Amino acid sequence: MRAPRLVIGAAWLAATAVLAACSSGAPEPQAEETEIPDEIAQAPLPAIAGEGNLGTPLAERVATVGLLNKRNNISRDIELKPGEARRVDDVIIRLASCERTPPWENPPLTGAFVQVLVQERAAAGADLQWRRVFSGWLYKEAPAVNVVEHPVYDVWVKDCAMRFPGEEEPVARPTGSSAASAAPSAAPSPAATPEAAAPASDAADT
């Protein structure tokens, strides 16, 4: 009667060993590449004429650019100032400028001049090389004007943080204790009101 138990125990040990071997052989997640090659980092960006004359100085603006990897469907927001670049594995985004129309102009338009470089092989078996796949303006409200055409990556502009003279700062809503202190004071008690005190004075007269 002990033979079946021995067979079951041996089978369980074998299954455990197989699972351990599979887990030990699983590849570890690789760290994301963020280093930008010197030849790309030192390459001059296009000079954008006529930009930065109104509102926030060009060097202080912040553009938010969306990046989508179509292979794994992972998207992220990348914030850049003019002159900055950001690498995410095999793609580099460089920002030359960003701009939006003043609030008194219609229609509203938000744009950013970006360059997109992708590290890929020109042919099967060739070495990996950085290739510029886009250089120009992207517009939030008119994405069809310019499109980054690439089978793996999609890039679009989401915002350009800047202000114009006369724009008001957003008003922060009070929260917590500040909201309590800003609340109107409670109504006075009836004893303190003239109507409540009147009967007492009448009683004194009688």
Image (cartoon, rainbow, N blue to C red):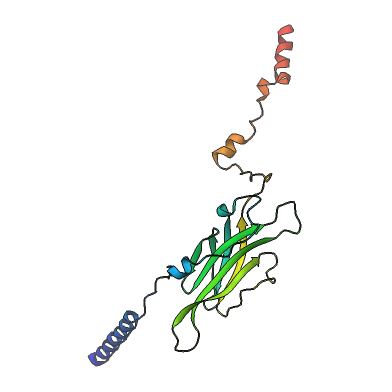
Direction from residue 34 to residue 133 in the image, left or right: right
- Taking 94 as reference, is 11 above or below it? below
State the image coordinates of residue 198 (x, y, percent, origin top left): 73, 16
For image coordinates 69% across by 64% down, the residue present is 141
Quadrant for residue 52, please give it. bottom right
For image coordinates 50% across by 64% down, the residue present is 85
Taking depth in this image into account, of 180 and 105 the one nearest to the observer is 105
State the image coordinates of residue 200 (x, y, percent, origin top left): 70, 14
For image coordinates 58% across by 59% down, the residue present is 63
Taking depth in this image into account, of 25 and 56 the one nearest to the observer is 56
Quadrant for residue 183, please give it. top right
- Taking 72 as reference, is 198 above or below it? above
Q: Report the quarter where the N terminus lies.
A: bottom left
- Taking 98 as reference, is 3 above or below it? below
Q: Residue furthest right?
A: 106
Direction from residue 64 to residue 188 in the image, left or right: right
Q: Residue furthest left?
A: 2
Would residue 36 be visible to someone looking at this image? no
Q: How many marks?
A: 0
State the image coordinates of residue 104 (x, y, percent, origin top left): 74, 51
Q: Report the quarter where the C terminus lies.
A: top right
State the image coordinates of residue 84 (x, y, percent, origin top left): 51, 61
Would residue 62 be visible to someone looking at this image? yes
Taking depth in this image into account, of 170 and 175 the one nearest to the observer is 170
Direction from residue 120 to residue 9 in the image, left or right: left
For image coordinates 70% across by 67% down, the residue present is 142
